[in-house]
Amino acid sequence: MSAPTQEEAILALFLERSEQAIRELERAYGKLLYQISHQILNNRQDAEECVNDTYLGVWNNIPPAEPRPLLPYVCKIARNLSLKRYRRERAAKRNSSYEIALEELDAYLPAASDTVEQTIEAKELARSIDRFLDTLTEENRIIFLRRYWFSDPYASIAAHVGLSEKNVSVRLTRIRTQLKQYLEEQEVRL
């Protein structure tokens, strides 16, 4: 039998209700969780608080949840908590790279949902976007996700994929145009 992976070991600690689980989660993913939160909030203290709230959220949900893989589960909690704080604390300021990234997509996506029908449409939109992402090359998918999921600035994306900022900007423009065309073909109301 092979040795458990780092994720499996951390998950096992959570299932045993060992406080060491939080320390191991922080050691393994703390920097990434902070980066996700900070890209949305643009505030060190708020990001740190959201990361700590993420650890608490994971602690409260495992068990009964046994997420496999663990990393996307934890990242989603961090992102959702950061978004919740962002919306709560958002004033009339436009200082977050997250807000700027979302503004880039505004013309390509339908408005936010308030009714049950709109919520159902939003879930279908998410599934359509997932299918669209499957049509992209791996590099373009990484560029898209780093910009619109992690809210990375162009410079960071360019460094990550080894392209110029201008090239990343052009690719994102093309990807957004392709996304709009794809959604229109799927008859998603824009």
Image: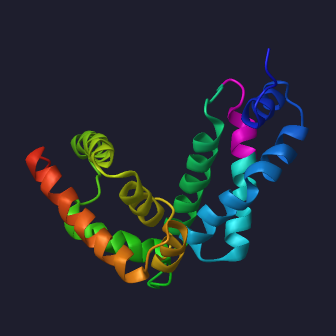
- Dominant SS of magenta comes to helix
Q: Above or below — where is 14 with respect to 46? A: above
Residue shown at the point (64%, 26%) measured from the top left: 65
Quarter of the image for the N terminus: give it.
Answer: top right
Q: Above or below — where is 14 with respect to 157? A: above
Q: Residue furthest top?
A: 1
Residue shown at the point (53%, 59%) measured from the top left: 84
Residue 32 image-quadrant placement: bottom right
Q: Is residue 62 magenta?
A: yes
Residue 99 is left or right of residue 174, and the answer is: right
Residue 82 is left or right of residue 59, and the answer is: left
Residue 50 at least partly seen: no
Residue 117 at least partly seen: yes
Query: Viewer-proximal residue, 102 or 119?
Result: 102
Q: Is residue 77 magenta?
A: no
Residue shown at the point (19%, 59%) measured from the top left: 178
Find residue 47 and report its horizontal and vertical position in percent: 67, 67
Residue 3 image-quadrant placement: top right
Q: Above or below — where is 140 with respect to 173? A: above
Find residue 153 and report its horizontal and vertical position in percent: 49, 76
Find residue 182 and report its horizontal and vertical position in percent: 16, 51
Residue 72 is left or right of residue 172, and the answer is: right
Quarter of the image for the C terminus: give it.
Answer: bottom left
Q: Above or below — where is 8 with respect to 156? A: above
Query: Viewer-proximal residue, 49 or 18?
Result: 18
Q: The magenta stretch spans which residues?
A: 56-64
Number of disc labels = 0
